[in-house]
Image (tube, helix red, strand yellow):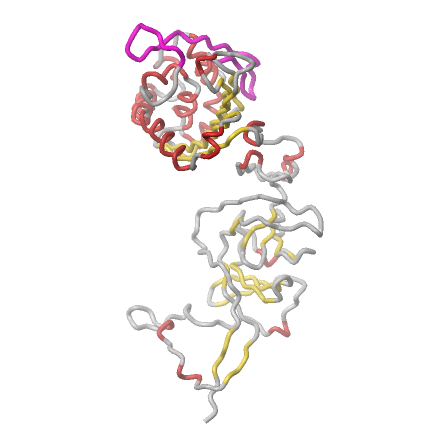
Amino acid sequence: MAKVVLNYSLPNLITLTKHDTKLFFNLNKIPTSSSSLFNQSSVSRSKLYTSISSVSTNLTDPFEAELESSQTPDGKFDWYSNWCPIMPVCDLDKRRPHGKKVMGIDVVVWWDKNESEWKVFDDSCPHRLAPLSEGRIDQWGRLQCVYHGWCFNGSGNCNFIPQAPPDGPPNGIVWFWPNADPKYKNIITKQKPPYIAEMDDSSFSQTILNREFHYGYEVMIENLMDPAHVPYAHYGLMQTRIPGKADREGGIPLKMTLENFNINGFTGMGDPGFNQFFAPFVFYSCVPLNLKEGNNENSKKRALAFICVPISPGRSRLIISESRCDDWINKISPRWIFHVLLNAVLDSDAYLLHLEELKIMEAGIGKWNKACFVPTKSDAHIVAFRKGKFDKLCLKIRGGV
């Protein structure tokens, strides 16, 4: 007896759930012409469904296929564990996406000319949830969202975001502009994210780490502006200048100056080194690689970029980048060593900062100056941050302390 088996040719697809709340974009290269290559590996939050549009036949029994996948654990029939018909190919136009609904699921069907296959996605752009079926197929064969122009390839990867920096993310950090008002459509041409030259300088060794903390943005950033706490809160963990003799830790008076103070931040001299605050997220410090050399122009430099991100009340994220000039040891050391050493430092005062935040909150929002006594020059940058009300820039989403 002649037997028939359905032999499906399935594309190798990545399936993401509709409820995935994380969306990352690795913008290594942005296409600028029809000859551009799209190497981004950013993944869309949209669900990408496996689809088929052709079948081949062989001789076997069609009823020999196992049907266990169509059953739920309790033995009931699972409608969603089956192939669901959408439309005949002859009624689909390869030049545009088609919005269809199947069993309550809104999907978009479109022809991927690069892989010569029909694709089926969740009909919702992960950016602002606009229906992808209202978009178009662009000249490179990508599915383009009609709302902001985000483009997706046949694997569901977002490989072009028009609003992203055309040369890729500065310093290898992904930035975005939260305000979607049309007047900010070309904001990248007028205002760029802060740029740290050392992070892209090949003569510097680079190490980077990111971590979340259970204390707020304000407490985090003022702690990073405060060099006076290093010999005490991080005793024995970090290099310090020639110690004083007043106590075991060797704390000494620090001369911190403030310059060019305005709404966009401030610059100032540390002791030693140069500091700059790019309001509201980035604090940059450039110090001698050997702190004992002081502010010597000929000494090798070490640049630290602290990128402080408010997450929610009582939570923040720190992205820290260390760039060392001509430091061959750092270049050959594995990244995990940097993580271990730096996390030991970050852990050593995390509990103190958590308690500090609680006490400032008890004093009341906006009453930091009444709760804290800061008479020395070593607190100059912290006072500038607070008095400049940079801490209030994130008050609405942070809760403020």
Q: Position of residue 278 (x, y in %)?
A: 54, 24
Quadrant containing the C terminus in the rendered view:
top left
With 176 as the anchor, is 357 left or right in this view? left
Which residue is at 38% across, 77% downward? 66
Quadrant containing the N terminus in the rendered view:
bottom left
Quick one: which residue is furthest to the bottom in this view?
A: 1
Which residue is at 32% across, 72% downward? 76
**Residue 243 in magenta stretch:** yes
Viewer-closest of 165 and 149: 165
Q: Position of residue 329 (x, y in %)?
A: 45, 30
Which residue is at 51% across, 59% downward? 122
Residue range of the region highlighted in magenta in the rendering = 241-270
Q: Position of residue 149 (x, y in %)?
A: 63, 49
**Picture mark count:** 0
**Residue 206 in magenta stretch:** no
* Position above or below: 363 against 211: above
* Position above or below: 267 against 153: above
